[in-house]
Amino acid sequence: MSLFDQPWMEDIPNDDVTHMTGLGLESNFSTLGRDRIFYYQRGIYGEISRPILVLLHGYPQTNFTWRHIIPLLPKDIPLFIPDVYGYGRSMGLLTPHDNSLTCANLLNTLSLHLHPALASRVPIIFVGHDRGARICHRLAVDATRTSSLNIVGTILLDIVPTLVQFQSFSTPSSSVSTFHWPFLANVELASEMIGAFGGDNWVRMCIDRWAGKDKKSLASLKSDKAVDVYAQFFKKPSVIHHSCDDYRAGSNEDVKKQEKDQKAGRKIDIDVLVLYSADYLGKRYDVKKVWEEWMGKGDLQVQNVGDGCGHFIAEEKPQECAAAVVKFYESF
């Protein structure tokens, strides 16, 4: 059986893999832990002299999200770029998809690929967009408390904390624009309805709703047939189900843990860069003010991206996004 002849990936083309490996990345499935996770990597084996950059995509996408960012990063930055559990080519977790379990499994997978002498010492910086950023937020809170790895910083693309997101449903306009949050959290109902509508049709609709209006940015987002790549995976019932369970956990375990964190004063003690769309997230929140309430000893930097950029910052405005990532990275 070849690398991509996995039973749950039947009929899925590999054009995206060809594109990403053409950028100097190695593709692989991790079978070292209990869960099979698909990832790209560069330079994480053996001796590592620079911090590892971990890139986590959001909904309803895959690690192909980062195709524009990779060529804009210095070539000596070690990279680990997985499909989040249950998305793309990665299998779903055998347990519910709450962020704490996702983080634990992800860190275990990464540590198993590092040299044992380096696993607890090499600095790691996480970058996440959308659902991937919510994993990064959980990791950032736990970084100085329970993590076995040396997480030194995180970059969050276009999110506010999950608790804040749900609190904003008291505003009717916010409820309408983010209707998918409570919808997807009803896993069985949402899975059946999305399947009937067509998972690929659902993905195209979501991306059209959340993207910006700038023509150049839209062309960048949709280049390399990216929307086709994302849509093809949502033809798989397992991807629909696991991604819905991600939102279910967000409405339950994840948000409850954030409530407990805030009450107990457990905040973020590592450095954070929040990069957000002025015309998307910025229209609904005072993003800097929101995140200040969640910071502990860590330094907070907040930067907006304008010029008609929508939710998909890394694809709509890759030059600006990559420049911010590199500047933050080089501070360590």
Image: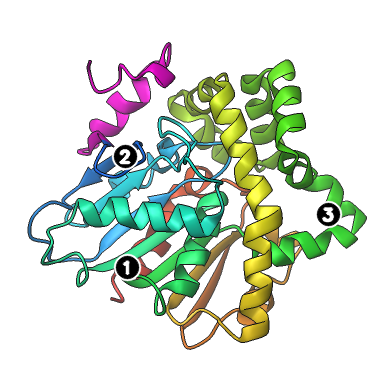
Residue at mark 2 to residue at mark 3: CA–CA distance: 34 Å
Q: Is residue 17 magenta?
A: yes
Q: Which residue is mark 2?
A: 39
Q: Is residue 76 magenta?
A: no
Disc 1 secondary structure class: helix
Residue at mark 3 to residue at mark 1: CA–CA distance: 33 Å
Residue at mark 2 to residue at mark 1: CA–CA distance: 21 Å
Amino acid carrying mark 3 in the image: Ser
Amino acid carrying mark 1 in the image: Tyr
User: Which sits in the foreground, 243 or 206?
Assistant: 243
**Residue 174 shows which numbered tag?**
3
Does the image show residue 203?
A: yes
- Residue 98 lies, with reference to residue 268, above or below; the image says above
- Residue 197 lies, with reference to residue 302, above or below; the image says above
Q: Residues within 10 Å of mark 2 (few under 14, many from 20)?
A: many
Q: Residues within 10 Å of mark 1 (few under 14, many from 20)?
A: many
